[in-house]
Image (spheres, grey):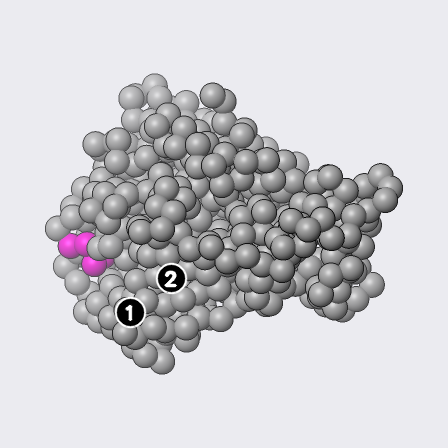
Amino acid sequence: MRITPAVAALCMGTLPRAAHATTPETCCSALETTALKSQVIYPDSAAYKTSIGSYWAENVQLEPTCILQPRTVHEVSLAVSTLVAADGGACKFAIRGGGHTTWAGANNIVDGVTIDLSLMNTTTYNEKAGTASILPGSRWEGVYETLANYNVTVPGGRSGVVGVAGFLLGGGNTFHTARVGFACDNVVNYEVVLANGEIIEANKESHADLFQALKGGTGNFGIVTKYDMKIIDDDKLWGGIVTYDNSTTLQHLEAGHRFINNLENDPYASWIGMWEYLSLTDQNMIANALEYTAPVAYPSAFDDFTTIANTSSSTRVANLWNLTQELGQASGYRDVFITASFVNNLDVMKRTIDIHNRMIEEAKAGAKGDDYTMFTMIQPWPKLFADHSTEQGGNVLGLDRFNENLFQVLFDYSWKDEADDGLFNQLANSALEELTTYSKSIGADNEFIYLNYANSNQNPLSSYGPENVEYIRTVAKKYDQTGVFQNQVPGGFKISAVAQ
């Protein structure tokens, strides 16, 4: 155990305390009395504006009272200790990594402090250990670009702009999941700052219970300041985006249904089916992200897709950095994600796209702005994924309790005009509710909710199964006995919000 200066100060009772009722300004002032003073920024500064503007979705760009930008794990420790001690623990704060979550308040706050980890963004390749050490403010494009210099990679986000921290703490579906399990299954060590400022390492040998809980348990335990991940040799893949006319929908759904059931026969293959409407061109189209995690062109695993006539294709042999550049959606929009999982049933797939097409018509009739995009994505979640997780020691997602092959649906709507917030949130919620109701009526529903795609009105942790919910609750209480990350950090999905 390492004792930080902040912890020592707490033990000695020397950390400055506010002398009056807590306000957000008091919390910012408490940080300014420490060595962190120069890293506390306010709304009138350029650095503050840059930080707020770097959140991917405009609807989550809240304005906290102040922002703290630590550069090291010890500065994170000092920040947490200070905020927890200030005025009896009444300071509210948020933790921000890459800033890609699409609902307001998940990783930001209004009346309080945002700890912005974006300056902690380096990746180090440890060749002898076969690992990469990744800091929490990194985005996957930076991770892949660094590791490409060594012709290695890690199983991470499929869009370069996605942040590392939230992705890994929520499980992390990758191009490599069918080969090596989820991204979280490939983390071998977490460096964590606890609520009392203590810095610990969580791995199979040390704090093994926390190590397990962090694999999908999100920010219920502390702030992860470093992720050590197993590397994959050779970062070359074949793949790209292939577009098609919307009239080929049935062919794609049939191909996708077969692909999910046969993925175990070639786990190098990855497919994301995207049905996309662009209002500016009034274009409703299909795009497949076909990726093969070896430099093999047109592998037979994709035969059912490649025999369908396409309108364009960007497929090529490239590294992961290159391929994840084209899967990043444009920033500068307002956005909503909402998701659910289903048994791999072709009728549910068909209904998914029927609903997609109907929501487009409702948007056309009701939208005040003329610039919006409506994505409906279908992705495989076969039993193979959970089997690999189990082989690697398991996680807390709870997918191992299902015996069927699943697929996941993501409704992702983005729009420019704030006046359309209500419309697109209502459409997304209605789409999912209708699809879920239909799936239940034919016995093809599944309770799992992927946390990284979940909306604020969903409760993904509750979908992990009773055993894992209780495990997360127990570990959170052990490492955060006073509930700092349940109460002082209100953002994100909290285990305390799951009914006992």
Q: Does the magenta stretch include residue 10?
A: no
Q: Is mark 1 on a helix, strand or loop?
A: loop
x and y percentages locating residue 294 in the rendered image: 21, 67
What secondary structure predominates along the stretch shown in magenta?
loop
Amino acid marked by disc 2 = Asp
Specify the farthest residue to the top. 441
- Residue at screen point 40% across, 44% down: 210
- Residue at screen point 43% across, 41% down: 217
Q: Is mark 2 on a helix, strand or loop?
A: strand
**Which label number is shown at residue 129?**
1
Rounded to the nearest angstrom, the CA distance separating label 1 from label 2 is 10 Å
Amino acid marked by disc 1 = Ala
**Which label number is shown at residue 98?**
none
Q: What stretch is highlighted in magenta?
A: 266-270
Q: In this view, does 62 lie to the left or right of 408?
A: right
Is the residue under label 2 in contact with that under label 1 (CB below 8 Å)? yes
Specify the farthest residue to the front. 12
x and y percentages locating residue 297 in the rendered image: 20, 69
- Residue at screen point 50% across, 34% down: 477
Which residue in the protein does label 2 denote? 228
